[in-house]
Image: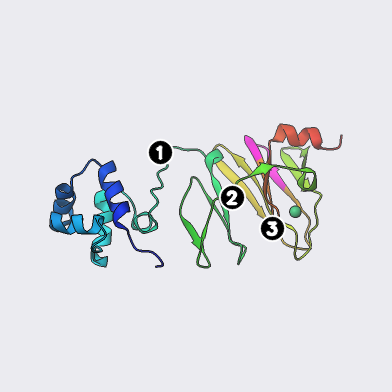
Amino acid sequence: MDKYVTGAVIRKLRENKKMTQENLAARIHVSSKAVSKWETGQGFPDISLLEPLAEALGISVIELLSGEDIRNLNRSSNMMKGKFYVCPVCGNVIQAAGEALISCCGIKLPPMEAEEADEEHAIKMEVVEDEYFVTVDHPMDKDHYISFLAAVADQGIQFVKLYPESCAEARFKISRVRKIYACCNRHGLFEVTPARAARRSPA
Ligand SMILES: [Fe+2]
């Protein structure tokens, strides 16, 4: 744990929940004076209180400690709003249906922001029967390569992990795919819609 809950976070979350210091104190069986002390930086809640405190404030303990209130308001949010998280140390790739607090190798990972594919990372696509055959004309060296390709539809994701010395290609079932992603270990995440990729493909 590299961070502990701060008074400002407790106050903000309490006020968001429209609770008084007394209300919050009653929920977690402490005195309102204790809550007041935490909020003014004159003390910290005991570690045994983190769980009840997070529950009373309607967030997870990890959110409470990070000071970030990640609320995916649209709980039925579809995969198109999903995020990729890539660890720069071990290369782990985590895909989440919405924004989340993700750590790997001791680093808090930001969600990757996809850019429209540039010339160097042009994502090309051919339709072969019921599949998209996706290729990226890009080096696949140890130090610079496409680390994964993914096809995202409303209801799911198809993901292919790639490795140096392999080919930057993958096959995806066409079924309702709305976006194709390619991740370069040096240049980041690129995206293209099937319609746009098809326009770039050789005839
Ligand atoms: Fe690249």
Query: Which secondary structure, mark 3?
Result: loop
Query: Which secondary structure, mark 1?
Result: loop
Q: Give the mark, 1 or 3, whose residue is nearer the N terminus.
A: 1
Q: Nearer the viewer, residue 136 or 23?
A: 23
Pointer 3 residue Cβ closer than 8 Å to ligand 1: yes
- Separation (CA) of disc 1 from disc 3: 31 Å
Q: Is residue 50 above or below residue 153?
A: below
Q: Which residue is mark 2?
A: 112
Q: Tag 2: residue type? A: Met
| Residue located at (77% from left, 34% from top) | 198
State the image quarter where residue 133 is shown: top right
Q: Quadrant of ligand 1?
A: bottom right
| Residue located at (31% from left, 53% from top) | 8
Q: Tag 3: residue type? A: Asn
Q: Nearer the viewer, residue 153 or 101?
A: 101
Q: Tag 1: residue type? A: Leu
Residue 142, magenta (yes or no): no
* Extreme residue toward the right, this view: 203
- Separation (CA) of disc 2 from disc 3: 12 Å
Residue 6 x, y percent position in the rendering: 32, 58
- What residue span does the magenta drawing correspond to? 171-179
Q: Give the mark, 1 or 2, whose residue is nearer the N terminus.
A: 1
| Number of numbered markers | 3
Q: Nearer the viewer, residue 82 or 170?
A: 82
Residue 35 x, y percent position in the rendering: 19, 56
Q: Which residue is mark 1?
A: 73
Dot 2, crowdedness within 10 Å: few (<14), some or many (≥20)? some
Q: Which residue is mark 3?
A: 185
| Residue located at (60% from left, 46% from top) | 113
Query: Which secondary structure, mark 2?
Result: loop
